[in-house]
Image (tube, rainbow, N blue to C red):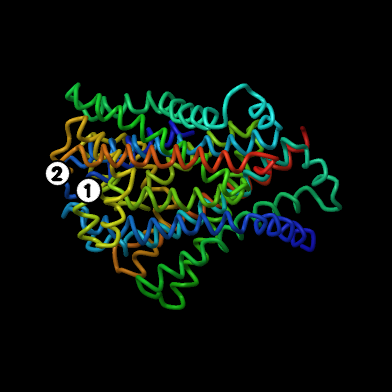
Amino acid sequence: MKAILHILEHDFRNFFRYKWWLVGLISMNLADLFIMAVVYNYMLSDKAGITNYFNFFAPGLAVTGLFASAFMIGREINMERRREVHHYMLSLPMTRLELAIGRVLSGGLRGMLYMTPLLVTCFVFVGFPSIWQLFLILAVLFLLAIGISGLSIAIAVSTSSLEKFITARGLVYYTLFFCSSVFYPLSLIQDLGREGKFPAFLVTLAEINPLSTASDMIRNFLLGSPPFFPSSLLNVLAFSAIFTFGAAFAYMKIIERK
Amino acid sequence: MRAIWFVSQIALFGLIASRMIAIPDYFRYYVSGLSVMTLYSAAIFIGFDIYEEAEHGVFEYLLSLPVSRRQLVLGRSIGGGLRSFIYVGPLIAISLYVIGAINPLSFLVSLFALFLFSFGVSGMSITIAVMIKSSDRFDIFMGVLDALIVRLSTAMYPLAIVQAANPVYGGLASFNPITYAADLFRWGTGIESIITLQNPLVPLLGIIAFFSFFTFVGVVIYDKSIEGGGWQ
């Protein structure tokens, strides 16, 4: 446990080295909310089924912020691998499992930390959940964050160059962001799928996408719609379990080989 | 990476978001705005090259070349704009295919305006890079500037809507080079009915002013900053 805490400390120190970069990133997120979402409010069609895009988008923005920041750990691990810093990491007096779990956990916790001001902004402008709903939101977002952290680590250790990592990250980012209910209601994607204008597998991806589950759950708690099915939390649980353990295993095996 | 972003913005975000928006033909509107946004972010990259050259000692080599400082910065500005134009060219071709028919004469005018726009953005990027002198600060500044300049423009939404949403946003969007470039590109590609462009000469003059300002201010600042290792 103490070893994992050391890894957390190491990764949080790295995270705060980019504090101005993080300020820039947060300001970009807030520009999306306070400029783009405000203007989109005036362009909504009846088909959208949204009365206020600002309120609709605020929970989605917190989830995208969480995703982007939890994914940052992958870039650092990819860099460590290329610069052979991982030899130093492997020489530390801790087990491989502690090292791997520490990295996945720190990526997730950094995502939670970054996401906090965005979630608070969402609560301030959209409304506050009950205390139990708040616990559930934080628990789901934490599971999502460590799943994302695991996914980024799995990509980082499987790609040999920064270009390959950035390309893979771009593919994952945009597929998961745009095939989700972060920016628009899930019903629009389903309608396009029924009309044959959107591939069925992307519609299914949007339905099981943990980003959709987390965004819609927060919306349900704050706005009362769309409907929230507790069974959908299994998507987040499965995503988190697969990528946390998958990444820990990949991290232990692949960095030892290089 | 940028190509993946561009294609996914069209095929996923543009397609689905156009369902959500009440503006007729929003998909074509969005695709044309996306071309200008991509051109802007590609032209910005010349600023990062300045830091890389300073770090690797290429700056000294460039200063030793038998060209004047003014020729050097003008060449870099035009080179940066041209390379971003070549880079974004295939993406613009995709967007033209999606948008459909064009009027050749209007399109040539708007293409010329896009050339000037990308030279102007390169000049702006060089000017800011030389003034800031730190790649980290430059990265952050350009990120924030990108967030504001793109969102406070007509790249994603018509000016009338921006003005209705917030008069301050509308005022800023009216004097934004991305607005000028996006409106002219739409005018050139024949979808001006959505943007209600009264006179294409106004955005064209705006682009020329933007290009002239940053190219010539860039020359002066570059000239003053680089002598005696002043860029370090």
* Quarter containing the C terminus of chain B: top right
Chain letter for mark 1: B
**Quarter of the view holding residue B186:** top left
Instruction: Point out residue A31 in the picture as x, y percentages from the top left corner.
Output: 40, 57
Instruction: Point out residue A12 in the picture as x, y percentages from the top left corner.
Output: 68, 59
Q: Residues within 10 Å of mark 2 (few under 14, many from 20)?
A: few
**Quarter of the view holding residue B135:** top right
Q: Residues within 10 Å of mark 1 (few under 14, many from 20)?
A: many
Question: Along the line of sight, which residue is nearer the eye, A167 or B136?
Answer: B136
Q: Residue furthest bottom?
A: A131
To which residue does mark 1 refer?
Answer: B158
Question: Along the line of sight, which residue is nearer the eye, B125 or A100?
Answer: B125
In the rendered view, tell whether residue A84 sits above or below residue B106: below
What amino acid is labelled 2 in the image?
Thr
Residue drawn at the location 17% of the way across and 35% of the way down = B191
**Left or right of residue A219: residue A136:** right
To which residue does mark 2 refer?
Answer: B196
Question: Along the line of sight, which residue is nearer the eye, A59 or A236?
Answer: A59
In this rendering, the label closer to the viewer, 1 or 2: 2
